[in-house]
Amino acid sequence: MKVGILTGGGDCPGLNAVVRGVTKSALKRGWEVIGFRDGYRGLVEKDLVALGDGDVSGIIIRGGTILGTSNTANPFAYTLPPLGSVEKPRDLSKLAFKNFRDLGLGALVAIGGDGTLTMAQQLYKRGMPVIGVPKTIDNDLSATDVTFGFDSALNVATEAVDRVHTTAQSHHRVMIVETMGRYAGWIALRAGIAGGGDIILLPEIPYRAKDIIKAVLDRKRRGKKFSIVVVAEGARPEKGRMTVTKVIKGSPDPLRLGGVSYKIAELLDNSSVGLESRVVVLGHVQRGGEPTPFDRWLATGFGVKAAELLAHKKFGQMVSFRDFAFTGVSIAAAVSKLRRVSPKAQEVRAALAVGVSFGNSRITG
């Protein structure tokens, strides 16, 4: 069999480990492997590279993806020049199928998040043999217990929270650390707990200004002249909206978030807490760097399991990690809903038990 691989959506640590896992497993079975450059763009524009054992040796420790990626190359609404434009997206899925057949491919492995996998499901429904591998630092795919890239992003975010403690204590300030997480607040939640955050603001728990101010004032009354706020980029006030910095036309998810931390800082600076606020926006720092040992292990397992699903022709499935075992689930089930933080979750209750505020007094555990 001849297998194609692509990495779509945002980059994250562990992508190369998956490419390596799929490629090495496929080569041991006597298959050929090709990689498409820049996600679905490579499939649509027939931009590819042959992958041999030497091409994937030593890449397990590297962040990003050797194949490149794109979060705007949608075969069903293609906007990349010269084949498409933002103003008039083109359905180039037939061209993608033609290239697939012309290359003599027997299957495609699509590695990505909900956008990439939704496109993979559309291709599968139209007859392309596809296997999906879940990738997102947000950890928000419901059909798997964890996605690779999340642990690496969590480590970066936790270290940032750790580091601002000394500045907060020394200068008697409120330090606000903004993490990624547009619809799911897993990074902010776990980094906030692990880093000893005092207030954690999540997309799933709309905050109230008076409750954030009260949490800081309560700490001050207890003699604690600083506070650490960890906020996910998708956090929003009750009866309010997420903070959108810009809209990218042609993107599967056109909203670009960021800046909610500055709103929280302004809120505190204009209140009666009497403490200065400072903001640290982590942004794409969370996506970069080497993957953690756990993510390397997890991504390798995902890649090997993907090759196993290919061998058994279980197309239309996504690799999943459940109950500490690798398995396959339908891509359709994987992208049907997001895995979000429940306000009643055990780890939310644990945070409340040690005095963390979620900026909403209605959340009591």
Image (tube, rainbow, N blue to C red):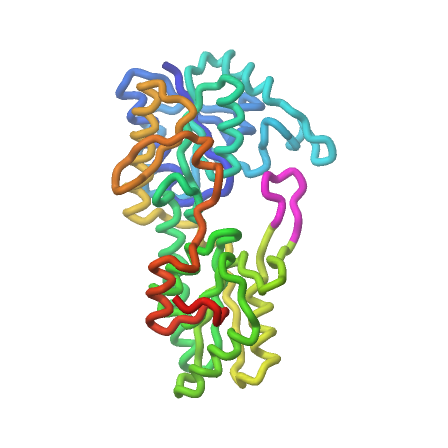
Q: Is residue 106 left or right of residue 79?
A: left
Q: Residue at x 36, y 64 (%)?
A: 349
Q: Is residue 190 above or below residue 332?
A: below
| Numbered circles on residues, count | 0
What's the magenta region?
246-255
**Image check: 29 left or right of 315?**
left
Q: Pick the residue in front: 76 or 103.
A: 76
At x 43%, y 36%, the residue is 334
Q: Nearer the viewer, residue 312 or 25?
A: 312
- Residue 25 position, x and y percent, is 29, 25
Residue 332: in magenta span = no
* Quadrant (top left, top right, bottom left, bottom right) of the C terminus: bottom left
The vertical placement of 240 against 128, above or below, is below
Inspect this view and state whether residue 80 appears: yes
Instruction: Identify the residue shown where x is 61% and y is 40%.
Output: 251
Residue at the image point whose x is 33% and y is 24% from the top:
309
Percent coordinates x, y for residue 112 in the rendering: 46, 37
- Look at the magenta stretch and give its main secondary structure: loop
Task: Please check the rendered image and state whether residue 249 is part of the magenta-colored stretch, yes or no.
Answer: yes
Q: Position of residue 277 (x, y in %)?
A: 53, 76
Position of residue 158 in the picture relative to residue 279 (left or right): left
Q: What percent of the width, then of the height, locates residue 142? A: 42, 42
Q: Quadrant of the N terminus?
A: top left
